[in-house]
Structure formats: C-alpha cells, structure tokens
Image (spheres, coloured by chain):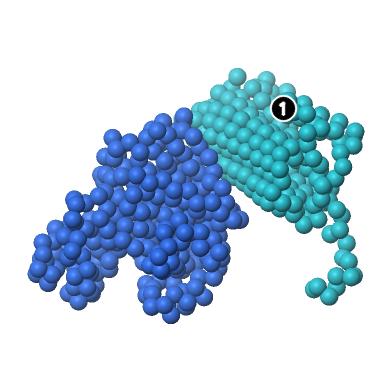
Chain colours: A cyan, B blue
Amino acid sequence: MTSFDLAAQPLRDLNRALHGIADGDNRTAWEILNPRGAHAVAVGVNQPVDITVKGNVGYYCAGMNEAATITIEGSAGPGLAENIMSGTVRVKGDASQYAAATGHGGLVVIEGNASSRCGISMKGVDIVVGGNVGHMSAFMGQAGHLVVLGDAGDGLGDSIYEAELFVRGTVKSLGADCIRKEMDEAHIATLAGLLAKAGFDADPASFKRYGSARKLYHFNVDHADAY
Amino acid sequence: MCGVVGLFLKNSKLSGDLGAMTAAMLAVLTDRGPDSAGIAIYDPAKAGKVKLTVRAEAGADWDALAARLAEAIGAKVKVAPRDTHAVLKLAEDAADDAFHALATIAPEVTLMSRGEAMEIYKEVGLPADVTARFGIAGMSGTHAIGHTRMATESAVTTVGAHPFSTGADQCLIHNGSLSNHNNLRRVLKREGIAFGSENDTEVAAAYLTHKMAGGLGLGEALDAGIRDLDGFYTFVVATKTGFGVLRDPIACKPAVLAETDDYVAIGSEYRAMVMLPGIDTARVWEPEPATSYFWTH
C-alpha cells in the first residue's frame, strides 16, 4: 500500500505521482489521507490501480479516469469523475452536481445521493446511484445507463438521445422527449448486471425504464412556424 | 464566482472563537473571491442599546466624531474604532436621531449597519488581509456570515462588497449574478429606495427590505424573491437571531451545510469547514434548490 498524506504533501505531487505509475508498476494500491475537501484529487489516472481516498473531496475528483478503481470514503464536490473513460469510481457518501458528466465509459457508483445534472451529456458511462438524483439528470444523455435506486428530480432525461435510465422511486417530472418505456427481459438482465456490478441488492423488476421518444432527432417541418 | 461562509453557534461555549473560526473559513475561499471581503457578526449589545457601524474612507477622528454626535443628540455615545470602521453604541431611543445627525455632522461617514447585535465590516482586498485589518479573529458572538467577492456585475469597491444590510440586524450575501437587477432597481427607485452602487446584490437586499417593510417576514420575502429575482444565486441571510440559506431553482452556485451539536456551518465548499471542531463527524449535506433553510436561537 502506497500512502499519500495531503496534509503533509501538496496535491500536485500526488497527481504527478499517480501519473508516474508505469505499466507493470508494483504500486497497485494507494491510499490518500486528509483530502479535506481538496479539488482535483486523483485526476487523469490511467493505470489499473486501486486508490482509496479517506475523506471528503471537493471539485473534480477522479476526473478523466481511465482503468483505475477509485473509492472515496466520504462525499464528493461538483464534477466527480467528469469525462470518465473506464475503470470504477465509487463514492460512499453523496456527490454534488454534474457527477460523471460527459462520461464515455466505466462505472460510477454513488452510494448516497447525487444532486443536479448527474450524468449530463453521458456518452457511455454506467452510473448507479443508491439514493436520489437532482434535477436535469442525464440531460442530453447519448449512451450508457443511469440507475437510480431512490427518486429523480425535475426534468429527468431532458433532450435525451440513447442513454437508458432506470428509476426505482418517483420521477418528479420528465424532460423534453423523455418517456417511460417498457421493461423486457433484456432490460431486466442489463439492470440486474448493473446492480450486481455496483453491489446493490435490489429487485430489477421494481424499477421503471425511461428513454428517448426520438422526436427531437430531426427537424420537423410541421413545426417550422414555431421558429 | 464568489465564496460564502456562515457559522451559527448552538453551543455558547464557542462564542469566544466565533470571529477566529469565521475568519479562517473565509481565508480558505480566497480563490473564489480575491477582490473584496466582508463579514457580519452578531454579538448582542446590552438591553436598550443599539450599535451603528460606520465607515470613513480615509479613517476619521472617531473620538471627536462620537463627541460631536453625543452633543447633537443629547445622549451618550461610545465608540469602538476598527481600522476604517467604527461601532457607535448608544441608547436605542436615540438611534433615529443619531442616524439623521450623522448625515449632517459627518457626511463623509457611511452607515454600514444598524442593530442591537449586528456589526458589518467590509473592504477591498484579500480575505485574510481584510479580516486582519478589522481584528475579526478576536471577536465573539452568536453567529456570523462572511463573503469573498470575485466581481462580475459592478466595480471592485467597498460599497460593492458584501454583506449588504437589508434592515436593522439583517443582511445578505450572495454568490451568483442577477440578470434583472437594472429593471428591479428602477422599480424600487420609484418606490423611494436609494441605492449606493450599481451592484446586483444591493438590489436583492433592497428588494427584501422593501418586501419586509410591506409586512412580509424574511422567509416570505425570500419566497417572493424566487419569483421576482431572475438569475443565479446562493443567498445567505442573517438576522438578529439566526441565519439561513436559499439557492435558486437551477442551483449551479454551490453550497454545503454542516451540523453538529455545537453549530451549523454554511460554506460554498466543504474545504471552508475543515478546520471546525468535530467536522469529521458532522452531518454534511447540500441544500436543495429553491428551498429555504433557517436556524434561529
């Protein structure tokens, strides 16, 4: 276990050290102490290492993650795992706004609540939230899955493309062009796989599925007068 | 961007540390607002007394001013200078006379705040420098709020710094920007309200003052503000007995709350609270959009 204490060493040294992990490096387990709400903790990691952050973090933790498994034993500020490419980011507490924004791949697990704009413009990432998500979650979501075990706020899936949304609780309102869809066996299997990967014990059949009505994809000449 | 902090003590044993804790919280948020800083601190005066916090641009002979004011109103005036500001303490029933007399005998002096408990200190500069100038770290009280400003809507001046007083013992700080402040200022000017700056937050403060003068409580005035104030905001308001926070419905301006048995803390970010006692076991959460939160003694 390689330990890094942010109370004793500067953040830039941490990220530099993480970026310096080479292929086949034997430092595969890292622990980061005293994050104390710092910004940009463990961003841009691109090796399959395990990183545990012991406490709350500020903005942009685990951004652009590739291959690493990053666990935050606390809550995260805005922009958690922004543009994640692969790997896993897990938050034991809550995550602030736009968690996993623009994520291309990998898995983001938020065991508590996520606030507004969770998964905005998601492009392939899988997001599993144990609690609730705030308004405008999965806005313009293009690909990937957002699973919410609690409730969703206003405007869920506004202007959504082909991201798939599963919500167990209530949805305060659906955004433009987002509709409820049927759950068939394939969807149940997909959802069961996501819940298992995220480590949540929940019945996939208790969720509802939402996605794009595909009415916003093309210009509709009948609406020309509206512009 | 701007930074907001606030600390409401539930345990009076911490009151001697209030100024030091608030100053430390504010300094952490320097990178959210290096232009100016301000603080409103609440420390109740003796019964029947009122505090006027005043400011003179280049300082003043505060003892001489207090003597002239005492003569003009025929009542005792105690003065406690702090850098460019001074707190004048006098009998509550002489406060109106003092307010009017000040405009005549010392037109160079600006009234920053008035109330039984509230004192407002604000200046241009880095938060740590501003709080050091005023000796904030040595102050005690029941609750305090503070602001670090990154100016976007109007000039970097002391009158453009936060907090803005919204009435006796009431003030407002703001992270965000209002988009309809010019129109709202015109409306409020027609109602007879005077403005000291082109600042958007001053309009929000005047709006709340106006609504409360019309009979609304602070909570109702804030609820009305959700409808009438267009823009982005995390507002922190403070009154004689407590403080509260309100975020706009879009809620892109951050806010974090922390509560223990000893205090409630507000910050733009969690890192502004990490020095508080017991923070590791505090309940920490994010206030919901368009929902007001209040704590009072």
Quadrant housing residue B123:
bottom left
Q: Position of residue B174 (x, y in %)?
A: 46, 58
Residue at the bottom extreme of this rendering: B190
Question: Left or right: B36 with respect to B168?
Answer: right
Q: Is residue B38 above or below residue A122?
A: below
Number of dots carrying numbers: 1
Residue visible at 57% across and 51% down in the picture:
B289
Can see residue B106?
no
Q: Position of residue B162 (x, y in %)?
A: 39, 59
Instruction: Tell which of A111 and B56 is nearer to you.
Output: A111
Residue visible at 47% across and 77% down in the picture:
B187
Question: Left or right: B234 with respect to B114?
Answer: right
Screen quadrant of the C terminus of chain A = bottom right
Screen quadrant of the N terminus of chain A = top right
Q: In the structure shown, which secondary structural element does the residue marked by tag 1 occupy? A: loop
Residue visible at 66% across and 43% down in the picture:
A133
Q: Is residue A57 above or below residue B234?
A: above
- Dot 1 alpha-carbon crowd within 10 angstroms: few under 14, some 14 to 19, many 20 or more: some
Question: Left or right: A23 with respect to B168?
Answer: right
Can see residue B185?
yes
Residue that badge 1 annotates: A200
Q: Position of residue B83 (x, y in %)?
A: 24, 57
Residue at the front extreme of this rendering: B215
Chain of the residue displaying label 1: A
| Residue type of the residue flagged with mark 1 | Phe
